[in-house]
Structure formats: C-alpha cells, structure tokens
Amino acid sequence: MRFRLVATVIATAAMLAGCGTENGGTPTPAPSSPNATELPRAGAPKVATPLDTAKFASDPCSAATNAEIEGVAGKLKRTEAEDIAGGRGCAWIFNDLAGSVSGGLNVSQPDGLSHLYALNKQGSGVTTFKPLPDIGGYPAVVFANGGEGAGNCNLAVGVRDNMMYTLVTKLFENNPAYNDPCGLNVKIAEFAIQHLKAAQ
C-alpha cells in the first residue's frame, strides 16, 4: 500500500513532465519535438556526452545501491521496482515511516529536459523551476507543479537530449535528509550517473 503511494507520486511527476496547465486547470500539451536531432530547445542545455540508459530501463534499482542510499539518507525498509506512468522506476522506502525516494527514466517524454524548459518558458506547467550546476557532467533542474514543501523535492537530470532521469523525494521529519531533500536528490543523481557511466 505504501509503495503504491510512492508510485503515484513519481507517476504524478512524470505526468507533470508531460503536460502544461492553463489558469483554469485544463491540461494542455506543451510544444513537443519528436525528432531528437531538433533538441535541445527552449534554452535547455545540450547533453554533451549522451548515455545509454538500457541498464536503468531493465533494472531501475541499479541506479543506486542500498548501501549508497543508506549512507546519505538513513536505514531502508525495502527497495522495490515497479512499472509506473513515466516508465519503469525504483522506490527506496525508509524505515520508521521516514519517507521515500523514487527514481526512474521518463521514457514517456521524448523531449528530455527541453520539455521542462519549454513549460517554464511558456509560463505554465511549473511552479518551481531551478537549473542546478551539472551533476556528474549532466544538466539538472529542480522542478514542481505544486506540492512544494518541507521534505519534498523533484529533480530531473538530462542523460541524453531526449531523455531525463527523474527523482521524486518525500521525506518526513525523522529522516536525516529532511531539511535538504534536493541535496539528497543531487547525491542520488550522482550515484545514478556513476552507475550509468560504468555500464557504457
């Protein structure tokens, strides 16, 4: 039951990365570029060294080992993979109801980070949009469309011009990373990039 909630959270982030909204709340598609050769667009940075993401597509929990996650965010209760709206994802669920982190490739959005940049540029679909310094040499953005608050953070890393790896974090006060969920996402993204590079 708890994991279904986690899957719903990351699926919501995946859907955010797939549509914008007007003031009336009606979903409207953001401009899309089906051809990867047209990317990046809308001011998104180019991914200089694209990564083959097949490893994460087949084994999403290989993005970070349990020991790596526990080293930065406390003891895990379990780690589970499941098919979700944006692709196949992994949930790292912490002991003592301390929250969770979900990560996965957003295969349903072929524009990669360009889509989030386009939503921000058109002024709808994102309530938070904050580019970060590159993570392991790859561009990253903290984003949200509502739901901001203590312990919460969504982060997307462009691993190719047409693919992003997304992390959705929801932590509670007894998690050691509660006061810096985006910092935790950066650390997990670093692990993910390292594992992807090792799989090339």
Image (cartoon, rainbow, N blue to C red):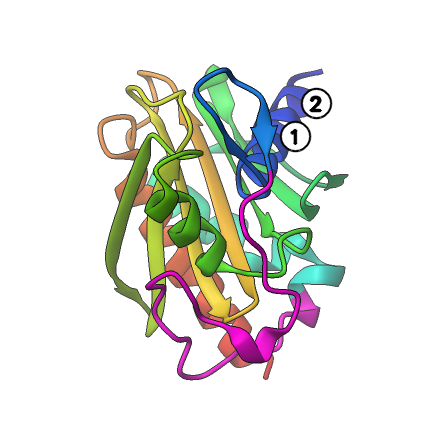
**Does residue 45 belong to the magenta stretch?**
yes
Label number found at residue 7: 1
How far across and how far down the image is residue 48, in percent?
40, 83
Query: Which residue is drawn at the image coordinates 61% and 59% (left, top)?
Result: 62
Secondary structure category for the residue under label 2: helix
The residue segment tinted magenta is 29-55
In this image, 99 relative to 87: left or right? Answer: left
Residue 72 visible, this orientation: yes
Looking at the image, residue 151 sits to the left or right of residue 31; the answer is left
The foreground one among 142 and 78 is 142
- Residue 96 painted magenta: no
Q: Judge whether 114 appears above or below 35 on screen.
A: above
Can see residue 51?
no
Identify the residue shown where x is 62% and y is 77%. Answer: 52
Q: CA distance from mark 1 to mark 2?
A: 5 Å
The one of 81 and 135 positioned closer to us in this rendering: 135
Q: Is residue 132 left or right of residue 172?
A: left
Give the crowd class for mark 2: few <14, some 14-19, many >=20 residues within 10 Å: few
Label 1 sits on what residue type? Answer: Ala
Instruction: Tell whether label 2 touches label 1 (CB within 8 Å).
Output: yes
Front one among 153 and 35: 35
Measuring 63% from the left and 33% from the top, which residue is drawn there?
A: 11
Instruction: Pinpoint residue 119: horizontal percent, then vertical percent.
Output: 42, 44
Q: Quadrant of the N terminus?
A: top right
Residue 91 versus residue 69 in the image, above or below: above
| Residue at the spot of label 2 | 4
- Measured as percent of width and height from the top left, residue 137 is found at 33, 74
Q: Residue at x 65, y 30 (%)?
A: 7
Q: Quadrant of residue 140?
A: bottom left
Tag shown at residue 133? none
Q: Against 53, is 115 above or below?
A: above
